[in-house]
Amino acid sequence: MDDRSIDRLISDMTVVEKVGQMTQVEKYSITPDEVAQYGIGSVLSGAGGNPEPNTPEAWREMVSAFQDGALRSRLRIPLLYGVDAVHGNTNVHGSTVFPHNIGLGATRDPDLVHRIARVTAAELTATGVRWDFAPPVSVPQDIRWGRTLEAYSEDVDLVTELSVAFLQGLQDVASGDLSDPRVVLGCVKHFVADGATSWGSATPEAIVDGTPFDGLDEDGGEERRRVIEEHDAEFGELYEHGTWGQQLDQGNADISEQELRRMHLPPYVAAIANGARSIMVSLSSWQDAKLHIHGYLLTDLLKGELGFDGFLVSDWLGLDYLGDDYYRAVVLGINAGLDMVMVPHEWERFMVALIRASETGDVSMARIDDAVRRILQVKAELGLLDDVAPERGTTEAVGSAEHRAVAREAVAKSVVLLQDNGAVPLRRDTELVYVAGEAASDIGLQCGGWTIEWRGIPGGDIPGTTLLQAVAGAVSEETEVVYDASGLFGGRIADVGVVVVAEPPYAEMTGDRADLTLPPGDIELIESMRSQCRSLVGVLYTGRPLLVTDVAEQFDALVTAWLPGSEASGITDVLFGDLPFTGKLPYAWPRNRDQVPLAALDAAPEPPLWPRGHGLPGAVVIAKQEEVAVESSSRSGA
């Protein structure tokens, strides 16, 4: 469909249909019939917005039902179905779960990131989903932020390089045509400087005192209270004592425009130059002004100076965070440059407010037409406005062996060898190996947040390989592998002990963490293991650097595997020397609390424990290759 056809379509639309295209609704809050009646432009599954049963087939059926509803609307405009697939299509049970982006930052491998995005796109389109709220292009300056795990690095150049690779992987196919049904629309986020917020500029009280949610009706209020109660129940004493909870997320970036442009804008410039067609706006503020109503940044800078002609979508509940005058929030947000609003629940309220604003002139019809044109243009580019039913994907690709091999490669390349006194590579014929730590056999802890549920599912039944299984599969048949989560093994001294410690799963504001030291239980486990083995190897599952200076000396070798996802065999590939350690730290690793955030580290008299870019090479066992060479030589008569 060309520009003239889009203009004719817009001229034929009622104001309700135009506003419908600008409305994005969470799937539990709307029916396919309502999508048809109001011409809704987009439906999303928030994290945990899964069908029952949570299978690829049920996902495809659910998405198809909403799409069929859109095709029953008067103008038959297909919708965009969106999800957060930030480390694989991880809402779907059985999908391939890749390392979180902090691990991919350690690989420094744009080709690998591109291939991961292609796999993610294949597993998304298999379920009918064509829009991914990724890649995040945040440049965190404070590792206490709960979204550090979603960000490739604190270095803007590395973030730019890898995020462009991911965006191109989602949107690129051999034909270079976005209308190819294998293409998934990327959504670069969160504009802008969400990684520059100041500690304490967002507080836990902002979640629980109701302030952000004023104006919600009774059902909406109940929904928020339910989320809050679950949030408090999961984190218990950590929140009670103020060590976890919202302090940075959705806070204020009190930085100059020069710093904003230098450190946080380049990934967006590069993304636009490489085909970005949708951008999500941050819930945070810049210089005390909410990004969702920041006309200078959204319209003057992004759409004007940078020439972005795709569409802007709000973040979850973005307008609700602007105060109790919802009508005013809608007017300010749309006039500032929002084109589509992730409502996500009370979509009727949003539509009524914007229709009223168009009637009073508080929002001009020209601004509404501009937003709708941007949305329809992107749908046209995706081939959705062609006079054919959208192609349905097949589900065989989800969690395939080929895709899991890419994830295993990503894990191996992301693991960073922090220190080693010759303990690795481990010997396969070791007589006795102790493995300890709950995370060694808990694939939910291994995957972290944004996996099946918003904050992940510790102990979850996620298909894949745990580190315990990977170790057992890597050693010889004669080796005895003994596991105890608490590290209580009895009197024998093992040749090797492997201890895994992990952050509890979290997402967004629930991961803001004041104290980055290991909890007492983990320290006790490490000390216990030290006394029960001759050589101790530590494996960290974490979404950011943790303060380990006081315990590092306990280890003969220490690695960070970040949050590796479903394929822990990638860890044993490097521990046992099948592959070299190539991972490099994408963040500086602070020595103590005084070196957090990054500005404090830069000003500190001591260097970090390990600088950004650190990573020991380890060694590779080449016995197998030598055996093959000898066998080949003997056959040739040499």
Image (cartoon, rainbow, N blue to C red):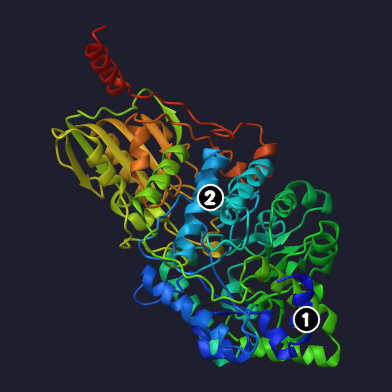
Quarter of the C terminus within the rendering: top left
Q: Is residue 336 left or right of residue 32?
A: right
Picture residue at 37% right of the left edge, 41% below the top: 570
Disc 2: CA contacts within 10 A as few (<14), some (14-19) or many (>=20): many
Q: Is residue 77 left or right of residue 546?
A: right
**SS class of the residue under badge 1?**
helix
**SS class of the residue under badge 2?**
helix
The type of residue carrying mark 2 is: Asn
Q: Which residue is mark 1?
A: 8
Picture residue at 82% right of the left edge, 93% below the top: 359
Locate residue 205, reporting x and y percent. Answer: 59, 72
Foreground: 543 or 161?
Answer: 161
Tell me whether the residue at label 1 lies in contact with that at label 2, contact meaning CB atoms closer than 8 angstroms. no
In this rendering, does residue 332 appear at all? no
Q: Quadrant of residue 39?
A: bottom right
Picture residue at 54% right of the left edge, 33% below the top: 610
Instruction: Tell me if residue 14 comes above or below residue 449 in the rendering.
Output: below
Locate residue 590, reporting x and y percent. Answer: 56, 39
Foreground: 222 or 301?
Answer: 301
Q: Which residue is mark 2?
A: 101
